[in-house]
Amino acid sequence: MNLPNPETLLAEITAKIKTQLEFNGLTNTALVGIHSGGVWLMNHILKNIKLDVPYGMLDAAMYRDDYAKRGLKTEPKPSNIAFDVTNKHIILIDDIFYTGRTTRAAMNELFDYGRPASITLAVLINRGGAELPIAPNIVGAEILLKPHENLQLSQDNKGKLQLSLENKTLETNNG
């Protein structure tokens, strides 16, 4: 499968986010990236739009409804929302949208900081497979994957974004 260039997709969603910022007003809109890929994207977006807009970061792992089953996959990252969320238009940014559980968890954590006026979800890729009635509003690409396939966004030491496709090994019960 040929994967799209994540830098090209990022340019597309950046343009859409800039339009959203101008529509809602810079003083009443904020960007929030979900660790880790969403924060990488948000940092690129902030650099490219060159506008002074409030921003923050969330690690929603502890808010997931499947936390007991999944546990922590990596070391938790700090959440940091240094602005008043109440009545702000929040543009929530993530890299790959799949089941909607990370988005739901991020929204739950976001509401701990206040009640936003609205939340717009921007993602680099919607891979299909939503399990909750949540869908991204701004999407770079729609790429339908099978359940055993997994897209990973990575960032090299120079900040260049890369996509890779992984196949999860299927576990069998031999007991």
Image (cartoon, rainbow, N blue to C red):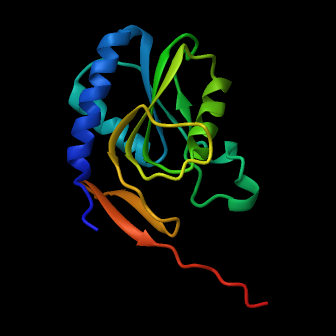
Residue 53: x %, y % from top left = 36, 19
Total labels drawn = 0
Q: In which quarter of the image is the N terminus?
A: bottom left
Where is residue 151? Give x, y as percent: 41, 61
43 relative position to 87: left or right: left
The answer to whether 126 is drawn above or below residue 42 in the figure is below
In this rendering, the answer to whether 22 lies above or below 80 is above
Q: In which quarter of the image is the C terminus?
A: bottom right
Location of residue 81 in the rendering, given as x and y in whole percent from the top left corner:
53, 26
Q: In this view, does 150 lie to the left or right of 114?
A: left
**Which residue is at a point 63% across and 48% down the rendered structure image?**
61
61 relative to 30 in the view: left or right:
right
Res 72 → quadrant:
bottom right
Looking at this view, name the residue that lies furthest to the right: 175
| Residue closest to the far bottom | 174
Q: Where is residue 144 in the image (x, y as percent from the top left)?
A: 41, 56
Q: Compared to 157, does 138 lie above or below?
A: above
Q: Which residue is drawn at 67% across and 46% down?
A: 64
Q: Nearer the viewer, residue 146 or 18?
A: 146
Q: In which quarter of the image is residue 108?
A: top right
Answer with left or right where residue 74 lies relative to residue 67: left
Residue 30, quarter of the rendered image: top left
Q: Which of 36 and 20 is in front in this view?
A: 20
Residue at the location (63% across, 22% down)? 113
Instruction: Compare residues 52 and 145 and report the one nearer the observer.
Output: 145
* Vertical side of 75 occupied by 123: above or below: above
